[in-house]
Amino acid sequence: MGLLDKLSGLLGLKKKEVHVLCLGLDNSGKTTIINKLKPSNAQTQDIVPTIGFSIEKFKTSSLAFTVFDMSGQGRYRNLWEHYYKEGQAIIFVIDSSDRLRMVVAKEELDILLNHPDIKHRRIPILFFANKMDLRDAVTSVKVSQLLSLENIKDKPWHIWIGETQSHVADK
């Protein structure tokens, strides 16, 4: 079973075509994660910061994914909400080694969860606790506590631990 099949299983996706929003602060590793989800022959060697957003499409044997890679830089975060209605799943990426901005990540998550286009939908969310291989990274349990994930009762969610370092920041 490939990574995309595991992802669709975790998110409970049953449709043939799925629109996924990939959100998180700048430099959390969103583009790197999306690149690793793609088939190996479609992966790129050079990851560049996302300005605004980009769209990636890839398939498994049973699903076609359209992933909206949304820039996490402050001036672009207000654009996220324009894609909420179309989103059928969310990947929220957290830089587990960036303790200082964990508060900002929680604020953005709270805004997301309380948006009218998300709040009353049972949209599945995958929290990707990224950069766990870095020395200053907090555990997935601590990430969950800092983001108050236990308070999310009306949406299926899962936290996934990742070690994909990203050394570029959204600009």
Image (tube, helix red, strand yellow):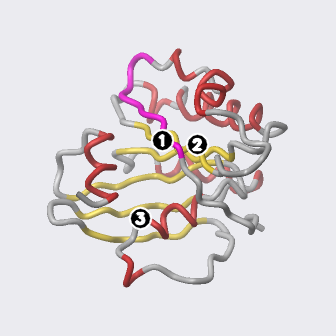
Q: Quick check: marks 1 and 3 in contact, CB under 8 Å?
A: no
Question: Pointer 3: residues within 10 angstroms few (<14), some, or many (20+)?
Answer: some
Q: Report the quarter where the C terminus lies.
A: bottom right
Residue type beneath disc 2: Ala
Q: Quick check: marks 2 and 1 in contact, CB under 8 Å?
A: yes
Say which label, 2 or 3, has the lower sequence index: 3
Task: Give x and y (percent) for residue 101.
Answer: 79, 40
Say which label, 2 or 1, has the lower sequence index: 2
| Above or below: residue 53 compared with residue 125 | below
Question: Pointer 2: residues within 10 angstroms few (<14), some, or many (20+)?
Answer: many
Horizontally, is 43 left or right of 12 in the view? Answer: right
Task: Give x and y (percent) for residue 140.
Answer: 59, 33
Q: Going 48% across and 20% down the picture, which residue do you hit?
A: 152
Indicate whether residue 160 is drawn in magenta.
yes
SS type, badge 3:
helix
The residue wearing badge 1 is 160
SS type, badge 2:
strand
Disc 1 versus disc 3: distance between alpha carbons?
13 Å
Residue most extreme to the right: 100
Foreground pick, 101 / 134:
134
Horizontally, is 154 left or right of 34 in the view? Answer: left
Residue type beneath disc 1: Trp
The residue wearing badge 3 is 37
Instruction: Specify start and end residues of the magenta stretch as a single range.
Output: 153-161
Question: Pointer 1: residues within 10 angstroms few (<14), some, or many (20+)?
Answer: some
Disc 2 versus disc 1: distance between alpha carbons?
6 Å
The residue wearing badge 2 is 129
Disc 2 versus disc 3: distance between alpha carbons?
15 Å
Residue type beneath disc 3: Leu
